[in-house]
Amino acid sequence: MALRATRSLRPFLAALCAASTAIAVPAWAQGKVYVSSEKDNRLYVFNTTGDRLAAIDVCKRPRDMSFNADGSQIYVICGDSNAMGVVDVAGGKLVGTVPLGESPEMFDLSPDGKTAYVSVEDDSVLGAYDIVAKKPLFEVKTGGEPEGVLVTPDGKTAYVTSEVANVVHVIDLATKKVSKNIKVGKRPRRFVMSPDGSELWVTNELDSTVSVVDTKTHTEKQKIKFAVKGMRDADITPVGMAISPDGNSMWVGLGRANHVAEVDVATKTVKNQILVGKRAWGLGFTPDGKTLFVANGLSDDMTLIDTASGKSVKTVPAGRVPHTILVSK
């Protein structure tokens, strides 16, 4: 399955292991695209050609999403309900919630899928929650307005962005403490890890860049600057990212610039920029990497991009303020 860009690259790293360890998605979920709509309090369901199939009512202001381990459920963070909704995929309905802190934003799961690590904006913490028992486990204080969360595949470390402090917190999950702060760009938002785990890519919304962090030294080793013809730097606001299934290209939503950029992972050069809808943030791939889906939060639609030609092929309505895209196999 193609998971969200701002959490760990566990699905891609898992591909290096035996096939028996891969996450299985039931037949009823295969080939579907889920889009969270913040204003409609729904998840919209599409096929991979952009036809809408269904709508699922969930909790208030749904944002970040992930499948559980066997793909039978979708976890969705609901910012105005202060909860994580649990959606039954086969039944197409909300079947439960897990209480969270004030204004939760993004999350990642522990390798065993039992714990959700959630950025809680108003409390300025990373909160750990037992999904089955539906109870908090612990909190780690962060800088102001934590957002992106990524848990390493070994479950030992969590990375969390602080939009106010302009840092990435490195959190030791055994000691439950911040072990290091990595200075990046202005208003860091989301993460993607390189397939080999050596690099952590971080979008910096307010300086038109992506930081590339060395995961061994926990230092920023490079910044990639974006420029769009006819756009001011202030309008180029990268937030969401997704890496192609082959690991060769990083795709970056440029926010108010209304474009998506394709970056060569090896050379860190921008290969292409594609016009999409307004405020391009959430991104998700089909498993074969042939189609990229882009949630356009201010034009209330989703753009489908043919990655081979580097062109948008269709834009479809996707509810009011679409946020995150989740694609099943």
Image (cartoon, rainbow, N blue to C red):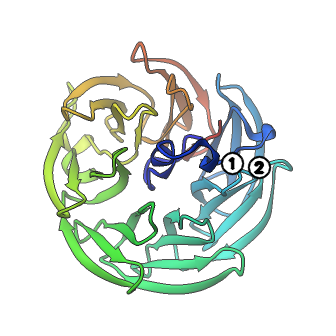
Q: Position of residue 65 (x, y in %)?
A: 59, 54
* Residue 265 badge: none
User: Marks 1 and 2, Cα distance to the nearest angstrom?
Assistant: 5 Å
The quadrant of the image that shows the N terminus is top right
Rendered residue at 72%/31% (across/down): 52
Q: Position of residue 4 (x, y in %)?
A: 50, 48
Q: Residues within 10 Å of mark 2 (few under 14, many from 20)?
A: some
* Residue 43 badge: 1
Rendered residue at 71%/81% (across/down): 133
Q: Amino acid at mark 2?
A: Ile
Relative to residue 304, is residue 278 depicted above or below?
Answer: below
Q: Which residue is mark 2?
A: 56
Tell me where residue 140 sits by quadrant: bottom left
Q: Earlier in the sequence, mark 1 or mark 2?
A: 1
Q: Amino acid at mark 1?
A: Leu
In the displayed structure image, the side of residue 297 where residue 268 appears, left or right = left
Relative to residue 189, is residue 112 depicted above or below?
Answer: below
Residue farthest toward the top in the current orientation of the protein: 309
- Helix, strand or loop under label 2: strand
The quadrant of the image that shows the C terminus is top right
- Helix, strand or loop under label 1: strand
Q: Position of residue 59 (x, y in %)?
A: 70, 63
Q: Residues within 10 Å of mark 1 (few under 14, many from 20)?
A: many
Residue 100 in view of the camera: no
Q: Contact, CB < 8 Å: mark 1 with mark 2?
A: yes
